[in-house]
Amino acid sequence: MQFYSTNHKSENVGLEEAIFRGLPQDNGLYMPVAINPMSDDFFAKIDRMSFREISYEVSKRIIGDSVPHSVLREIVETAINFDTPLVQVEDDMYCLELFHGPSHAFKDFGARFMARLMSFYLQKTHKEINILVATSGDTGGAVALGFLNQPGINVTILYPSGMVSNIQEKQLTTLGGNITAIEIKGTFDDCQKLVKQAFLDSELTKKKNLSSANSINIARLIPQSFYYYYAYSKLKAKGKPVSFSIPSGNFGNLTAGLIAKRMGLPVEKFVASTNVNNVIPEYLETGKFNPRPSVSTLSNAMDVGNPSNFARMAALYENNVDKIREDVEGYYFTDEQTKEALAKVYAESHYIMCPHTAVAYLGLKAHMDKKTKKESGVFLGTAHPAKFMDVIQEDIASHIVLPASLKVAMAKEKKSIQMAPDFRLLKDFLLK
C-alpha cells in the first residue's frame, strides 16, 4: 500500500515510512493512494462476524501486503481485546460505547493498534524512535498507556495547562518510564502547532527520529474505521439505513468513517457534531473553511479551532464542499445545551454520558428530527463519564462508578514539565 500527501508535493511512500514519518515534508497528511472496497461477500456475512474478524478483514484490505497477514491478525487480536457495547438509549438511537479500553477513551483503538504496528517494524530494524504527540484530553492517556514500556519507543506528550480534566491529566502525567508529559501554557492549538513545527525541523527529525501518534498519523485512522463496520453489523438485521453522529475535534474519527464509507460501508449520513468550536459545521453551511483560536468548553477534547484532518476530508472529496455535503451534515452545541442533554437522557433513560458523547447525541437527535424515513442512528460514546466527573452535574456524577484503573491513576503524583508555547524551548528540550 502506498500513501500520498494531501499537499501533493512529496513523493508517495509505503506504510512503514508513512507511520514513522508522521507528516510528509510538504506539511500535508498521508492518505492511501487507493481505497479499495470490501467485497460483497464480506458485507453478506458481516452480521455473523466478531469485532476482531471484521477488524482483521478491513485492516488487511487497507494495508495490503505491507505487513504479513499472520502478524496483522496478531496485532488486531492483542490491540482490540476489550468490549464495544452497542446500547439502545432511545427508539432507533444507540450509543456505541468506545470507552472500555485501558484509558477509557475511544483513542485506545488507534493507540494500541499503532503501538503494535510500530513495534513490529522496530523489531526488524532495532531502531529507537521518539513519539511526539499533542492532546486536547483523551489522546494523551491512550497514547501513554498504549506505548508504555514498548521497547525502543520514547513518548513526549504536550497538553494545554488547565484545559484537560483532572483524571485525563493524571492518566498522562503519572506513568513515568518512557512517558514524558509537557504542560504547555496555552491552548491545544498551540500544542498542535508545536508538534507540526517539530516534524518540519530537519535538525530535530534527523537527530531524534521523530514520529507522531496524533490523528495526523495515518496509523491512527486505520483502526478507527473498524467500529463503524461493527456497529453496522449489529444493526444490519433491522433493515433500516444507518447514520452515525461523531463528536468531533480534530476530525480524525469522522475521517475514518468516511474512509469506511468509501470502502463500501452503507452509511446513510455522517453527522459532524461539535461544541462552539464549529469550524466544520460552519464550512458545511457556507463553503468557507475559517480556522480560528479554540474556545474552552465542557467537552474539552473537542476544543480545536483548526482541525488537521480537514485536509483529509477535502482530499477525499476533491475539495468539493457539495460532494462532502452529500455524506456529511454538521451541527454545533453550547455548553448549556450539552448540560441539558446530559440531564434529559439521564432522567428519561438513566443513561450517563460524558460531555463529548452528549454533543454526539444532540447531533444525532437534530439529524433524525429532520428525517421523514425511519433510520437506525448511532452516536459514538467516546469517553467514560467518570473522566469528566468534575464537569458533569453533581446529581448525575454521584451515580457514576469510577473504574478501578482510574482510581489508581488519581492516587498517583502528577509529574509534568511546564513550558511556554515557544518552539525554541521545545526543540532545546527534545535535543537534550
Image (cartoon, grey):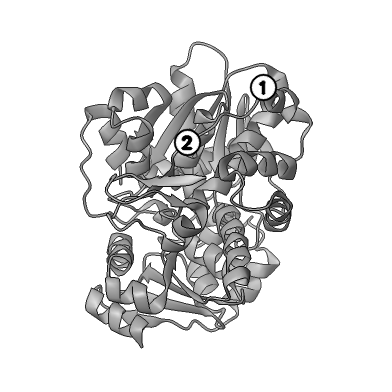
Residue nearest the viewer, comparing 431 with 361: 431
Q: Position of residue 341 (x, y in %)?
A: 48, 40
- Residue at horizontal 68%, vertical 46%? 84
- Disc 1 element: helix
Residue nearest the viewer, comparing 247 with 258: 258
Q: Position of residue 212 (x, y in %)?
A: 43, 63
- Disc 2 element: loop
Q: Residue furthest bottom?
A: 432
Q: Position of residue 430 (x, y in %)?
A: 36, 81
| Quarter where residue 146 is shown | bottom right
| Quarter where residue 156 is shown | bottom left
Q: Residue furthest top?
A: 372
- The answer, for residue 332, to whether it is visible in the render is no
Residue nearest the viewer, comparing 342 with 5: 5
- Determine whether, in the image, residue 350 is placed left or right of residue 305: right
Where 32 sits versus 177, above or below? above
Residue marked by disc 2: 34
- Residue at horizontal 48%, vertical 28%? 365
Question: Which circle marks residue 40 in the picture?
Answer: 1
Where 362 sits versus 384, above or below? above
Residue nearest the viewer, comparing 324 with 416: 324
- Residue at horizontal 61%, vertical 56%? 113
User: What kind of residue is marked 2?
Assistant: Ala
User: What kind of residue is marked 1?
Assistant: Asp
Q: Nearer the viewer, mark 1 or mark 2?
A: 2
In three-dimensional space, the C-alpha distance between marks 1 and 2, rounded to whole angstroms, equals 18 Å
| Quarter where residue 316 is shown | top left
